Amino acid sequence: MDNLLSGSIPTALASLPKLRAIMASSNQLSGSIPAALGDLLLLDYLSLSYNPMSGSIPTAIGKLTNLMLLDLSGNQFYGTVPSSLSDLSKLQYLFLTNNQFWGTIEPITRTMRNLRMLFLSWNQFSGRLPSPASSTLEQYQVDTNFFTHGEVKFKNCSAVTWTTDANCLAASASVCGRASTQRTAAVCAAFCGVEIGATGPVCGGHGYCSVNAFIGEGECVCDPNYMLDSSNTNACVAGATGASLESGSAYVSLWGSASVLSNGSILLTTGTPNQQGAAFASPTLRLFHFPDKRSRCGTELGFLAAFSFAMTPGNHGSGGEGLAFVVAAASPGKGASVGLGGVGRRSVGVEFDSVLSVKHSDPNDNHVGVNVGGSPVSLASATAPLILNDAQTKHTWIRYDPTSGGTLRVFLSSDPVQPLTPTLTASVSLCSILKPTASDSLFLFGFVALSGSQPQAHTILSWNVTTDATTLAI
């Protein structure tokens, strides 16, 4: 601590498996937190406070299940806090003060039963006030954020020192029955088009406002069975199908034959011929930021989609139409096909196809392809390195890099470890295809599947989508 250390944190630290503490606060460390630190499974203390570090918290930090202290205060970290931190059941001290974190954190802190101190002040957290289930809590500092609602009751209110001042809390919000001094209505009204905490329901009364004050934007995150109104992103309306699932930090809207199994997997088609199924996550994710609203695409974000799936063979081993991962401006319309053609021209899909279609210029009956604009003809394709429709689990990673015009890389494996070499690389510009604007920069992520004439079943076993600023996990 306080040793004038500079430069980035070396990933070589991950080669010290018995390391118990990293105490590097008040130095001149820069760069981001290496995901490799997640391999230090015996680590008890991680303190990087008061350095000029930036970037987001890696999901891999959630693997540090022995961690008792996590102190990232006084840096320039940003984005949402990954849901994997809810696995830190031994955590006693969580210090995130004075950064640029946004989004909701309440579901994560809810599982932290050993917390003694929670410091979240001076960020842009929003939604429900965090409500840790700890009976040993001593300090609770969440002031100067954008929390909008919640009634918090500690196990022992008299033993806790707390402040929730300078948020955007509704009149009904309280901690141990006591309200707090809030921001001015004018400040809160700048986000989600409503006067948060004053008049009018937030997000149409069916969600909460997720605020990113750093870029001057807010967006509604909708409750289960609700989704963003396509004509008014400040309102949540009933889902198109009325079938949604809350799983982790996301909700899933279903179309056609799609359903959710008891283990949380998504069954897109059931093994009956001529079925169509789709599942899209809500809320939408922002792929473009517009600090200058006159710019063509603003600042474009990259993303990583990591998921596993299984496809059964059809009759006599032949395949059905397969499934596709999709990024789209709109979900399937009422009565429309829920295949690639049903998500519209402003879409990009990665298909996993187990049937040969000569008219669509398929290379064979076991390939991966990148399709744009809802077209069944792939912009680029490659033979899959393993049999797609053998009913076995396939692990997939889709990485989009917006630099140099945009590159999409698809990795496929039977093991849950990403291969070094991609199965398919394609030059794709999301800016050119999705055509975002300052008022239209939120996009859907999901899956579509068609069984065709074959009794093929398509199952999504797990799914995680991460942009440069947001994580969505199913």
Image (cartoon, rainbow, N blue to C red):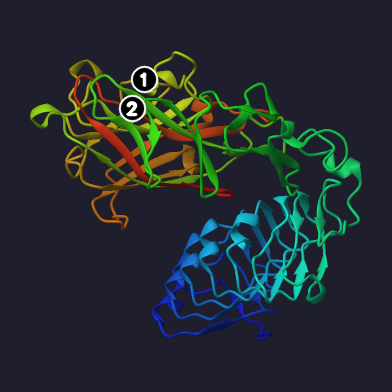
Q: Amino acid at mark 1?
A: Ser
Up-down relation of residue 362 to residue 7 (above or below): above
Mark 1, Cα crowd under 10 Å, few <14 / some 14-19 / many 20+, is: some
Closest to the observer, 83 or 134? 134
Closest to the observer, 193 or 294? 193
**Residue 298's x, y, as percent?**
64, 36
Label 2 close to label 1 by CB (< 8 Å): yes
398 horizontally vs 413: left or right: right
Mark 2, Cα crowd under 10 Å, few <14 / some 14-19 / many 20+, is: few
Residue drawn at (48%, 41%) of the image: 404
* Residue 275 in sight from this viewpoint: yes
Mark 2 vs mark 1, foreground winner is 1
The residue where tag 1 is placed is 375
Closest to the observer, 314 or 70? 314
Marks 2 and 1, how far apart in space? Answer: 9 Å
The residue where tag 2 is placed is 379
162 horizontally vs 395: left or right: right
Q: Amino acid at mark 2?
A: Leu
168 horizontally vs 75: left or right: right
Closest to the observer, 38 or 295? 38
* Residue 199 placement: quadrant: top right
Up-down relation of residue 19 to residue 221 (above or below): below
* Residue 55 in sight from this viewpoint: no
Residue drawn at (49%, 80%) of the image: 43
**Residue 248's x, y, as percent?**
51, 50
**Residue 153's x, y, as percent?**
75, 62
Query: Label 2's element?
Result: loop
**Residue 458's x, y, as percent?**
29, 34
Up-down relation of residue 150 to residue 2 (above or below): above
